Image (tube, rainbow, N blue to C red):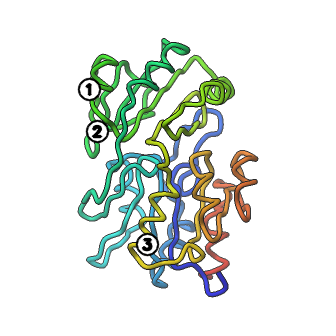
């Protein structure tokens, strides 16, 4: 990447936005130094893509905070850990990948019967079997039985147990194998399940191909286990300083923490103020 990146893939929570390691609660404001660094990359002609586990309606406010694209164009986003790709503004869903989640949900609830289950309704919100802790998911909420939730193919399933730990969910996911799915453990007892073979990396590969950009010319920044594939795939993958060690190990480099504006530091290498 001697001449700098042509595509910049950015995670949101823990990368663009600060979050609490203890609770995962996110400060929904991009620091000015980070916003300005991303805008410099965009103004230099780089394709900026937000690549996140968030749903579509939780991504568009981040574009608005960045003030992008702001020139009558539109930007691409990879949402729901790669299961949904859309352009904005306006929101136009470009692709979705769905899967039959009935068996994996049944298996997981045998081990954590008290867990909350949510499936995404693109651009709307979630259908769920019981409420999640306040602020953890947003959008319209519709209560249904588990059988109703998984009666049709879905893009994404979230399993959340406020009474378990991150370590317990890591052990459970490893023990079960979860064949036929791709799964990501969040900051606590949060399991995000996607269709098999689907990740931020798989969606970004399609985006790069559409834009005519080589993998070697992609710079990606992220902090979570759902960023592992993306950081390994990108020509330059950079982990945030507070990322788990396995995420840092998957990256080509590690920048500062989100609290210390790690995104701005990395982008300053390529697009100085």
- Quadrant for the N terminus, please: bottom right
Mark 2 and mark 1 residues within 8 Å of each other at the beta carbon: yes
Which residue is labeled 1 in the image?
Answer: 142
Q: Earlier in the sequence, mark 2 or mark 1?
A: 2
| Alpha carbons under labels 2 and 3: distance apart | 27 Å
Which residue is labeled 2 in the image?
Answer: 121
User: Depth check: 130 or 68 in front?
Assistant: 130
Describe the element under mark 3 as helix, strand or loop: helix
Mark 2 and mark 3 residues within 8 Å of each other at the beta carbon: no
Q: Earlier in the sequence, mark 2 or mark 3?
A: 2
Q: Is residue 247 above or below residue 140?
A: below
Which residue is labeled 3 in the image?
Answer: 209
**Outermost residue, bottom side:** 3
User: Depth check: 61 or 151 in front?
Assistant: 151
Nearest-to-viewer mark from 1 and 3: 3
Q: Is residue 32 above or below residue 193?
A: below
- Quadrant for the C terminus, please: bottom right
């Amino acid at each position: 990447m001697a001449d700098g990146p042509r595509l910049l893939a950015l995670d949101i929570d823990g990368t663009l936005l600060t979050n609490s390691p203890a609770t995962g609660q996110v400060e929904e404001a991009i620091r000015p130094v980070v916003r300005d660094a991303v805008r410099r990359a965009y103004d230099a002609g780089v394709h900026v893509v937000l690549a996140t586990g968030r749903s579509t309606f939780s991504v568009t406010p981040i574009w608005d905070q960045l003030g992008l694209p702001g020139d009558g164009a539109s930007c691409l986003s990879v949402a729901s850990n790669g299961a949904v790709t859309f352009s904005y503004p306006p929101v136009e869903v470009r692709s979705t990948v769905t899967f039959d989640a009935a068996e994996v949900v049944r298996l997981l609830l045998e081990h954590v019967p008290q867990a909350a289950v949510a499936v995404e309704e693109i651009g709307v919100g979630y259908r769920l079997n019981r409420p999640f802790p306040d602020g953890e998911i947003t959008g319209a909420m519709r209560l249904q039985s588990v059988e109703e939730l998984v009666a049709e193919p879905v893009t994404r399933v979230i399993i959340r147990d406020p009474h378990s730990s991150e370590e317990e969910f890591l052990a459970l996911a490893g023990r079960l194998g979860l064949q036929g799915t791709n799964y990501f453990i969040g900051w606590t007892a949060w399991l995000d399940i996607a269709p098999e073979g689907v990740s931020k990396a798989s969606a970004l590969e399609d985006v790069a191909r559409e834009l005519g950009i080589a993998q070697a010319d992609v710079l990606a920044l992220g902090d979570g286990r759902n960023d592992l594939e993306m950081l390994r795939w990108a020509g330059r993958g950079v982990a945030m300083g507070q990322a788990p060690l396995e995420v840092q190990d998957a990256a080509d480099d590690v920048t500062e923490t989100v609290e210390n504006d790690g995104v701005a530091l990395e982008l300053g290498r390529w697009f100085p103020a």
